Structures are given as structure tokens and as C-alpha cells.
């Protein structure tokens, strides 16, 4: 198999990476404190759940539209639009005086939240096929950076008052938008049919069976991982007497592992194993990790499970992005990655309520073991559909 390209990074890559990292830092500022903030407006637990779901639902609707728009007018303007929307949504959230305004702010933020999928398309545009595992993995590492730095910044900002973290997130997004206008390159392939009439601009890539199947697999894997995110603190409290602070420390460690794996380890694995094989292997590691976390009643079992889960997720996420890009014509990447992001958004809507209900009605272990089962189904579909043997190079 060809080695991963170790040539210097393409010109313009770091501006894209820093744009995504800063956007996710803002996301990391908001998410850990949003539920407590909403309680100030009389929100029940059920309403808090829907507050999170509103963001994901708006993202589900608008991510494919913004992705398709980036195929037509370019990546840079759509990323800038997305960042401006994030700034507006965060400001409205911070300035909210009632619960419905809070929902409005989250809807605007979610609806404009296509910066990641469009940035992924921009990176795929500029990378050679050999470079993609390295560059996509490094971009995915921005997730870990966001979840390491964001909560820390949000916690410090909250010392100034409950509204301050949201204003900080809004200011960060606004500065990011201005920097994007100045620094971001335009990467949409020249000669792409951007000017097609609307009735002729149907995203051909989205009719490819492989992409529909990848969306199904990504949806199942996302439901499983969000089940872990939503209920691990509850499991930790019940089994290991974890507090909010110690649970946050566990997630900090997971974020560090994700950064390490996606920032360098994924590319090295890509040199030795084809992406089509690497993705199902990563899903298998996630299955084992979730199972150990679910059944482990001691840290001797749970800690290795958490490590395997973080490593598997750190490989699976960029591998799935690479599979989507390889099965997509270059002038349809934005639409295809936007649709994939939509599938993940629906997973983030469904996963937490299902996990919470399972925790309450079945048992402490059930969200993790159930997530392992869903991931195992995703792995089985990859094998049944022979997706690990049908990796194309359509995209590049």
C-alpha cells in the first residue's frame, strides 16, 4: 500500500485547521454549562434535553444545504456565513431573557453549524489522495482540542456571571469569522459546475449507494457514542462515586487521547492498513471499549474500556470522513459531507434520550452495552455491504 504523503502541508491548511479548532472551542465553552444555564429560566430536564436536540435538528436540516451551497459558491464564504451565525446564536443565548429565546439562539447556532463538514471538504479539495488520512485526521483532532480548552475557558468565564461564557463564545466566533475572511483560502475545484441551474444541480453524489450506506453506519455509531457521552457521568456516580469534577477529568483525558490519535496516530495507521479495513477495525475496538465500560464494576476493567473507546472513536471518525470523500465526485464533496453531518446530527438527537431511558428503566450498564450492540450492527453492515472492499477513488 502507498505510504501516507509526508510532504509539507498544503498552503492554506493551517488557517482551515485553526478556524475549525476555534469554532469547536466555542462549542466546548457552551455545551457543559447550557443545562444549568437553562434551569435559570425554569427549564425542566425534559426541556433541557430538547434544547440540545434543537441544535442537532437545525444542523440536520441546514448542514446538507450549506454543504451544497459550498459546492456552488465556494467553501470560504459558507464557512464565514457559518461562523457569523454561530456568533449571533451564541449572543442571543447569552442575552436570553426567557426560555423561548434560548431555544431560538440554539436553533440559529445549529442551523449555521456547517463549518466542520465544509472545512472537511476544503481539506479534501487541497490534499492528494496519499495526504488525506494525515490531513483529515489532524482536522478531526480539532474536536479534542475544543473539548479540552472549551470547558476550561467556559468555567473561567462563568466566574464573571452566568451569561459571560456565551458572550465569550460569540466574541470568539466573530473574531474567527473576521480571521477567516482574511486568511482562509478558497479550495473549491476550479471548473466545478457551480453555475448549474437549480433544477440541474441535484447532488449526484448523494445517489451513490455507498454514501447512503455510510450515512446509516455513521448514524448508528453516533447514537452509540452519544449514549456514552450522555450517561457516563451517571454510571460513574453510581459505581465509582465520581463527582462533576472527576467526571469532567475523565472527559478531559478522553479528549487528550483523541487529540493524540487523530493528530498523528491515524495517519501512521493509514500507512499500514487501508481505510476500508481500518474503519471496521476501529468500530470493533469501540464495541470492546463500550462493553468493558458497561460491565466493569472496577477501574481495572472500566479504565482499559475507556482507553479503547477513545482510541477506536479517534480512528473511526476520520476514517469515515475519508471513506465518504473517496466515494464522492470532487464537485459534490460539500453536499456529501453535509449529508453525513446530518446523519450524525440525528444520531445526537436520538442517542441521549434513548440512553437516559435505558439507564432509568433497564440498568446502569444498559446504555454502554446497548451502544456496543449498535456499533456491532454498524460493523456488521460494513461487512455485509462489503464497504471495506469497495473503496473507490472517485473523489480524487
Image: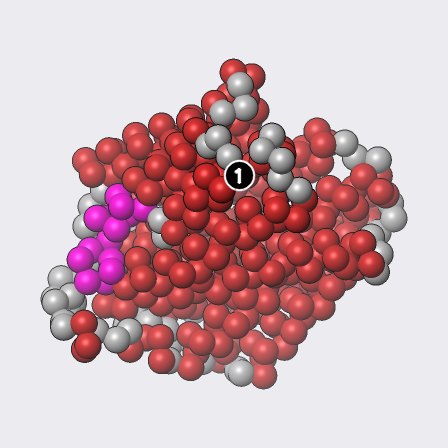
Residue drawn at 35 percent across, 63 percent down: 64
Q: Which residue is mark 1?
A: 99
Outermost residue toward the top in this view: 160
Q: Residue 150 vs residue 177: left or right?
A: right
**Mark 1 surroundings within 10 Å by alpha-carbon count, few (fewer than 14), some (14 through 19), many (20 or more):** some
Q: Is residue 268 visible?
A: no
Residue drawn at 24 percent across, 60 percent down: 69
Residue drawn at 46 percent across, 39 percent down: 101
Q: Does 382 sit above or below residue 60?
A: below
Q: Quadrant of the C terminus?
A: bottom left
Asked if residue 238 lies in the magenta stretch, the reply is: no
SS of the residue at dot 1? Answer: helix
Image quarter for residue 73?
Answer: bottom left
Q: Residue 321 vs residue 176: left or right?
A: right
In front: 334, or 278?
A: 334
* Magenta stretch: dominant secondary structure: helix
Which contiguous range is marked in magenta? 69-83
Amino acid at each position: 500500500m502507498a505510504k501516507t504523503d509526508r510532504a509539507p502541508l498544503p498552503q492554506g491548511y493551517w488557517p482551515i485547521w485553526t478556524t475549525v479548532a476555534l469554532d469547536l472551542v466555542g462549542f466546548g465553552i457552551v455545551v457543559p454549562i447550557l443545562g444549568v444555564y437553562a434551569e435559570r429560566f425554569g427549564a425542566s430536564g425534559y426541556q433541557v434535553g430538547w434544547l440540545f436536540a434543537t441544535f442537532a435538528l437545525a444542523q440536520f436540516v441546514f448542514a446538507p444545504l450549506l454543504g451544497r451551497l459550498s459546492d456552488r459558491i465556494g467553501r470560504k464564504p459558507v464557512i464565514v456565513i457559518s461562523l457569523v451565525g454561530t456568533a449571533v446564536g451564541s449572543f442571543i443565548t447569552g442575552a436570553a431573557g426567557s426560555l423561548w429565546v434560548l431555544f431560538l439562539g440554539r436553533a440559529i447556532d445549529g442551523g449555521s453549524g456547517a463549518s466542520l463538514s465544509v472545512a472537511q471538504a476544503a481539506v479534501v479539495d487541497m490534499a492528494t489522495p496519499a495526504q488525506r488520512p494525515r490531513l483529515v485526521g489532524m482536522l478531526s483532532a480539532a474536536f479534542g482540542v475544543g473539548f479540552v480548552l472549551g470547558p476550561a475557558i467556559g468555567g473561567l468565564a462563568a466566574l464573571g456571571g452566568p451569561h459571560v461564557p456565551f458572550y465569550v463564545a460569540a466574541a470568539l466566533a466573530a473574531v474567527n469569522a473576521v480571521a477567516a475572511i482574511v486568511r482562509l483560502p478558497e479550495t473549491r475545484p476550479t471548473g466545478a459546475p457551480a453555475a448549474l441551474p437549480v433544477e440541474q444541480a441535484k447532488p449526484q453524489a448523494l445517489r451513490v449507494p455507498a454514501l447512503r450506506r455510510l450515512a446509516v453506519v455513521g448514524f448508528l455509531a453516533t447514537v452509540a457514542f452519544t449514549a456514552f457521552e450522555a450517561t457516563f457521568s451517571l454510571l460513574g456516580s453510581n459505581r465509582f462515586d465520581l463527582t462533576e469534577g472527576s467526571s469532567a477529568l475523565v472527559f478531559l483525558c478522553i479528549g487528550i487521547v483523541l487529540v493524540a490519535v487523530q493528530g498523528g496516530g491515524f495517519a501512521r495507521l493509514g500507512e499500514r492498513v487501508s481505510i476500508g479495513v481500518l474503519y471496521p477495525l476501529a468500530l470493533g475496538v469501540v464495541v470492546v471499549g463500550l462493553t468493558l465500560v458497561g460491565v466493569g464494576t472496577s477501574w481495572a476493567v472500566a479504565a482499559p474500556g475507556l482507553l479503547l473507546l477513545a482510541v477506536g472513536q479517534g480512528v473511526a471518525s476520520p476514517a469515515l470522513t475519508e471513506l465518504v470523500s473517496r466515494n464522492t465526485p470532487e464537485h459534490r464533496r460539500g453536499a456529501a459531507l453535509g449529508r453525513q453531518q446530518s446523519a450524525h446530527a440525528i444520531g445526537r438527537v436520538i442517542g441521549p434520550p434513548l440512553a437516559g431511558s435505558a439507564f432509568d428503566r433497564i440498568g446502569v450498564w444498559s446504555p454502554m452495552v446497548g451502544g456496543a450492540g449498535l456499533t456491532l450492527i454498524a460493523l456488521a453492515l460494513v461487512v455485509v455491504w462489503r464497504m471495506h472492499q469497495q473503496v473507490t477513488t472517485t473523489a480524487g
